[in-house]
Image: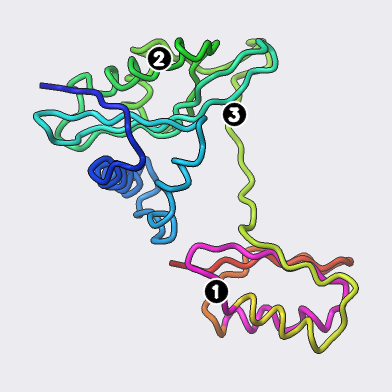
Amino acid sequence: MLEIVRVDYHNPSHRDALLTLLNHYACDPMGGGEPLPAQTQATLLDEMAKRPQVFSFLAYLNDQPVGLVNCVEGFSTFAAKPLINVHDIAVLDGYRGQGIAQKLLAAVEAEAVQRGCCKLTLEVLQGNEPGQLAYRKYGFEPYQLDASMGKAEFWQKVLPSKQLDTLGLRCPEPVMMVRVAIRNMAPGDMLEVIADDPATTRDIPSFCRFMDHELVAAETATTPYRYVIRKGS
């Protein structure tokens, strides 16, 4: 028997099921092909619980969690009404093609109607043909305003998780500040360093190599200088 359950982010069994299913999705080629960072797994449920605009449903088949949907309430300025973005939806291998995703979407739609929302939105990869078929079956279609302008694309810019602004500071103190900040990065962190003194950031590339961190961006043609550093998992 299939049962759709609203997630209680404080319920231990719900927390375990959500993380297990989300990691399964993350490890799928359509989810990026690797598990969630340890830091994300440690904080995700508590962060979701803080936000009333975030909600989730689990699909249980014979008491086993087999499907998940995570949603975020947004807002449409064109309609002056809230909307619901289907942020993640996943069904375990071996249980796909049984209508579980359709049941999860129906639960989301019911919640959206209760909240007075004007529409549901989601993002789907061009290569995810099974997902596209499932979404079209439920009534989704690519977003466009004027057909002559083409379909909308989903773009993103990943922001650093931390920033160290050393503008106006001079060596040697800022150099040590930068090194300490880089050393203290947690797995998955991104650090943005901004400086107007070249001596402050001169050894950042070599120090990143020493610490086995990734230098994502280095803008040094003009001041202020900007570096973005990522620490791997």
Disc on the earlier residue, 2 or 3:
2
The amino acid marked with disc number 3 is Glu
Please report contact status of discs 1 and 2: CB closer than 8 Å, yes or no: no
Label 1: state its secondary structure: loop
Assess disc 2: are there few (<14), some (14-19) or many (≥20) residues with their C-alpha within 10 Å of its C-alpha: some
> What numbered label is drawn on residue 109?
2
Q: Give the image location of residue 98, x and y in percent.
A: 17, 21
Disc on the earlier residue, 1 or 2:
2
Instruction: Name the residue at the front extreme.
Output: 10
Q: Which residue is drawn at 44% across and 40% down?
A: 49
Instruction: Name the residue at the bottom extreme.
Output: 172
| Highlighted range, magenta | 183-209
Residue 23, compared with residue 63, is above or below; it is: below
For the residue pair 184 and 213, the one nearer the viewer reads as: 184
Q: Is residue 194 magenta?
A: yes
Real-space Cα distance between discs 3 and 1? 31 Å
Q: Which residue is drawn at 61% across and 50% down?
A: 158
Q: Identify the residue under disc 3.
A: 153
Real-space Cα distance between discs 1 and 2? 43 Å
> What numbered label is drawn on residue 213?
1
Q: Give the image location of residue 89, x and y in percent.
A: 35, 31
For the residue pair 178 and 49, the one nearer the viewer reads as: 49
The amino acid marked with disc number 1 is His
